[in-house]
Amino acid sequence: MIERWHNETNARDDVLFPFPRPDRMTSMTRLFRRCLCLAVFAAGTVHAAPAHRVIVFVWDGMRPDAITQSDTPNLAALVQGGTFFSDNHATYPTFTMVNASSFATGAFPGTIGFYGNRFWASDAKGRDAKGAPVDFSIPVFTEDYAILSDLDARDGHAVMSVQTLLQAARKRGLTTAAVGKSGPAFLQDVHHGGVVLDENVAMPLAFARELEKAGYPRPIDVSSTRAGYIPGIHTVGFDSPAESITLSHAARDRSAFARGAIQAARWIQGRSGWFTMHDVLGVART
């Protein structure tokens, strides 16, 4: 993951790309970077019913056993007072964007026509969220709002073949907002008919200006690049006009990850509860 801060505005007329300095980051900004949240705000119905709000929260990769009274008491109370699905499954295991398309539409991949985290569309053209040209001659990673827009334009604005939940909501007179992780959040409203906010973009421009006027820091430019079959190169970078700082980790092969999994499996024998690699390695949490 590479983090960069800028003090400039993108020239597109429907998008504002504001990036805060590190000292202006807030807990709200950090929250956006850690979870995928789809919020649908009802501003009224066609029957003039009292205004109400519907909020749908989606966590990327939260296991059911992570919801406990001690760790997440509010979510545990929601489970007790609501409905718990004990046998739910992903429409396509571990593929974030495929499952995001199902959340967006309520349909399965075969109907939606959205099949993976990577697309190969050699005749597409465009730029990524950072404004860099995209090489569409190789499969591209779709957790990027700009790349999704490029693919949507290439497909005649039909990157998904099914109407989305937010499109249906707006047809019923509701006002919508999709907020969260870059890529999956944008896919909920790929034609951005409502408010869209992720790490890289705030739409429409009027909304971004409202955030700025209210004193909120603008979205931070965060990118995640998964290149080909490289086993693992992880770089965190902090960039400014005057200097840059990077921290890199390179894995030569996947055996290190396999050894870690085996070590964790051996350690957990005879134990019950919720653990992390901090426990396995005996490293204190900060």
Image (tube, rainbow, N blue to C red):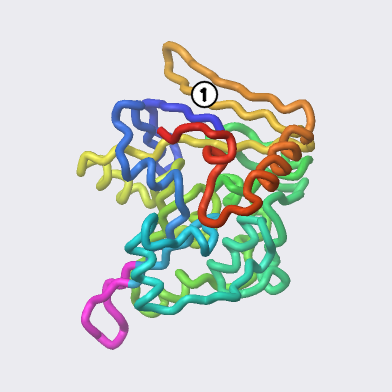
Name above or below for residue 199 compared with residue 61. above
Q: Image quadrant of residue 10? A: top left
Q: Nearer the viewer, residue 244 or 279?
A: 279
Mark 1 nearby-residue class (10 Å; few <14, some 14–19, many ≥20)? some
In the visual, does 120 lie left or right of 171? right
Q: Is residue 42 magenta?
A: yes
Give the residue at x 53% y 38%.
278
Name the amino acid type tagged 1: Gly
Residue 26 versus residue 269 in the image, above or below:
above
Q: Residue furthest top?
A: 242
- x then y, percent, for residue 196: 41, 54
Q: Looking at the figure, which quarter contains the N terminus? A: top right
**Picture coordinates of residue 23, whole percent (x, y):** 30, 26
* Residue 31 shows up from this direction: yes
Please identify the quadrant where the C terminus is shown.
top left
Callout 1 secondary element: strand
* Residue bearing the label numbered 1: 237
Q: Find the magenta span and give its range.
A: 41-53
Is 246 drawn above or below residue 233 in the view shown? above
Q: Nearer the viewer, residue 286 or 248?
A: 286
Tell me the residue at 37%/57% (across/down). Answer: 70
Residue most extreme to the front? 270
Residue closer to the observer: 69 or 147? 69
Placement of 28 over or under 109, stated as above or below: above
Residue 152, visible in the rendered structure = no
Quarter holding residue 97: bottom right
